[in-house]
Image (spheres, rainbow, N blue to C red):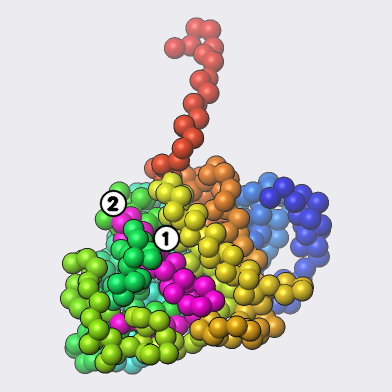
Amino acid sequence: MDLREEFYDVVEEVCKIDFAGGKGGVDMGRYLGGLVAGYDLSGEWGLLERAGELGGLLMEKGKGREGTRTGAWLEFTRLGQLIGDKKYCDTVSGEVDVLEEGQERTKLRGLWPVKGTEGDEVFGLGKGAEGVYGNLLKTAALLGRGREGRLERMWKEAMGVAEDWLLFRPMLAEEDRDEIGDRRDVLLVGEARMNGDEVETAPKVQHLGCYAGGMFGLGGKLFGNEEYVKIGEQLTRGCAWAYGAFPTGLMPEVLEAVPCEGDWRDGPCKFDEDKWRKEGSRKLRKPFKSVKDPKYLLRPEAIESLFVMFRITGNKEYQELAWEMFQSVVGATETELAFSAISDVTVHGLLKKLDSMESFWLAETLKYYYLIFSPPDLISLDEWVLSPGAHPFRRDSSGFITRGFDEPPRPKKKKKKKPGVP
């Protein structure tokens, strides 16, 4: 953003922070991501020095009887690449070992449960799972295809099961179909619940799971699977549609929608009025059953997917959807000082603000809104991987991800041959 004066003010302050006095956990992982990404973007050596110090502290704080557990896969991998210390990559590899072993032992082989006990586990891509699946894919992207094949294999296995048991189509009303036109081909991510040995798909949708559209799209481009790119488009449109389906133009934290019958692969279904009367809520717009948590917390997952799908397809529809969402977000959440989470997206009129602004609003949500309207070579996905915390790390460009933009590709500069050298 060329805010260089502000950037160097922060660099100066970062050098004063006593990380050793911190409590560890997620926040320290986020700090590490900011330091490593800051160095990758600027080359400011002091940031890498602090990142090395913090990485060592995280290693110590993460040690337990089952090995070191940090969850900071991309952060550790990139730090290890930059400072040439293999222990960070070994730590990530050890964490992957644990996941790999457990992947084949769960009730729904291929996915890891997010809650429950044996026989009544719940599986999903939202709360409790978002870091795992995103880390598998994005660490593979950071390393370059073929460098860590089991990450690709584990992610593909998980997504194959997710296709079968987590995805569903909402039963769109006829007026909704007309209103959204070509956007009607939408999917949402629900949950899979175990009832003994039986599996059922529950149409419970979390805003946290809206990253799945961009994840499917990115994985499709990275691994050469156009079907996954299409699924990514459908899921991304699904969350954008959910934003527009509420009077505030914002998607709630958790909702339930009346699903289409049958397999989602069969395409959009006709609206069933009788089914709606039995399962739907008269207080909400069709086809919603309930809103389990009506808050809006300034989350980034939906705009992340719009950004990723725009960059990999060049389809300007995603910019249009992003602008509609951004206007709604600003209109509902702006305050005199900043932006606030709101308590209920389903109400008309005056909204109750929660006097709370999570750090991810600045670190992730606004970053994605800024990038989707920026030139495509700014944090190009061919050259960078954005971590689950939206920190950009330089990647091994073994395969292009972006395409489809109006501007022609830039010609490569030809190297001048030295005399007498073929």
Q: Quadrant of the C terminus?
A: top left
Q: Nearer the viewer, residue 202 or 391?
A: 202
Q: What is the CA distance from the residue labelled 1 to the residue labelled 2? A: 13 Å
Q: Residue at x 47, y 45 (%)?
A: 382
Image position, residue 288 (x, y; %): 37, 83
Q: Secondary structure at mark 2?
A: helix
Query: Would residue 32 be found to the left or right of residue 190 on screen?
Result: right
Local packing at callout 2 (Cα closer than 10 Å; few below 14, some 14-19, many 20+) is: some
- Which residue is under mark 2? 226
Is 336 a magenta residue?
Answer: no
Q: Residue at x 49, y 56 (%)?
A: 320
Q: Tell which circle, 1 or 2, labels the residue nearer the N-terminal end.
A: 1
Above or below, comparing residue 224 to residue 191 in the picture: above
Is 245 a magenta residue?
Answer: yes
Image position, residue 89 (x, y; %): 49, 59
Local packing at callout 1 (Cα closer than 10 Å; few below 14, some 14-19, many 20+) is: many
Q: State which quadrant residue 215 falls in.
A: bottom left
The three-letter amino acid code for the residue at tag 2 is Glu
The three-letter amino acid code for the residue at tag 1 is Gly
Is residue 200 at all visible to an observer of this figure? yes
Q: Residue at x 52, y 57 (%)?
A: 386
Query: Would residue 171 be found to the left or right of residue 115 on screen?
Result: left
Q: Secondary structure at mark 1?
A: helix
Q: Nearer the viewer, residue 287 or 24?
A: 287
Above or below, comparing residue 284 to residue 399 in the picture: below
Q: Are marks 1 and 2 in contact (CB under 8 Å)?
A: no
Q: State which quadrant residue 337 falls in.
A: bottom right
- Which residue is under mark 1? 214
Is residue 84 at all visible to an observer of this figure? no
Image position, residue 238 (x, y; %): 38, 68
